Image (tube, rainbow, N blue to C red):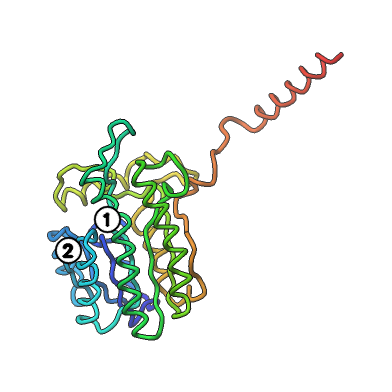
Amino acid sequence: MGDRLNNKVAIITGGASGMGLGTVRRFVEEGARVVIADVQDEGGDAIVSEMGDQVRYKRTDVSKEHEVSDVVDFTVSEFGRLDCMFNNAGFGGVSGELDTLDLGDFYRYTIDVLFTGVLSGIKHAGRVMKAQGDGGSIINTASVAGLRGGWGPHVYSAMKSAVISVSQSTSLELGADNIRVNAICPGFIATAIFAGQSNMNWEQRMKFISALEESEMASTPIARPGKGVDIANMALFLASDESTFVTGQRFVVDGGLTAGTRPTGPREVRWQRFGEIVNEIQNDST
């Protein structure tokens, strides 16, 4: 047990599994009281039973602004204040190639979960934090898919890019009230998002995540899948008083995925080929 979040209160959307659950556990370890905002009732109730009085669960569909507003107000009524809002809830959403991409209701729901939910969280957490008068931290889950193409479906990638942008723009408005807004960009983290739209219950999702964590699917310099705790540790820094001069930033947690492609083959063989090309050019010139 630590004390980096002693006397702090946090909301974690999507906190019943994956990165969110990892963050719930990490925050509680460091002394925070936490409200889990999710639609996974089975998981939310189980976590509250396991973790006790420091945790509450409130069913929250982040695609609906009034439910985000409600969970903010619920948190203040339960714990008296709000110090950290982690807008983490998300899913893969609508996908497909352009010629088959459905821009109907599911497309709009995807946008509302991945972007409107984040913006609503910033808006309503900011409302409470301003009134408190002593600042706070808002953390938004973006993705490496928001940094470049090819790492996620089109709409998902676009919305994650939008999350990075809105984190920067709102940080300028809220900074005067000592409210920090930052984004985390995970790489391949073992979560249920990789199960697609499969109709698994909460227990099955947890088993799926555990299997991913033990898999050998990583192709990153740090050769293992990311875990929820990897994101939780970054969120912990951003929620704590250690980051009071940090805002408007994006923090990539990806095992080195975005650092580049590691050359394959022995270094000596590559340099030998460079020398061969030089010799070929010089011989052609004589």
Residue at x 26% of width, y 42% of height: 103
Q: Percent position (x, y) of residue 90?
A: 28, 54
- Quadrant hosting residue 73: bottom left
Residue holding disc 2: 44
Camera-nearest residue between 199 and 158: 158
- Please identify the quadrant where the C terminus is shown: top right
Q: Percent position (x, y) of residue 133?
A: 39, 86
Residue holding disc 1: 112
Amino acid tagged 2: Gly
Amino acid tagged 1: Asp
Q: Is residue 36 left or right of residue 118?
A: left
Residue at the right extreme? 286
Residue at x 52% of width, y 74% of height: 245
Camera-nearest residue between 71 and 115: 115
Residue at x 31% of width, y 76% of height: 32
Q: Earlier in the sequence, mark 1 or mark 2?
A: 2
Q: Mark 1: few, some, or many residues within 10 Å (few <14, many ≥20)?
A: many
Q: Is residue 93 above or below residue 85?
A: above
Question: Of helix, strand and loop, which one carries label 2?
Answer: helix
The nearer-to-camera label among 1 and 2 is 1
Q: Percent position (x, y) of residue 38?
A: 20, 61
Question: Of helix, strand and loop, which one carries label 1?
Answer: helix
Cα separation between marks 1 and 2: 22 Å
Q: Percent position (x, y) of residue 185?
A: 42, 55
Q: Is residue 221 left or right of residue 3?
A: right
Camera-nearest residue between 209 and 75: 75
Residue at x 27% of width, y 63% of height: 13
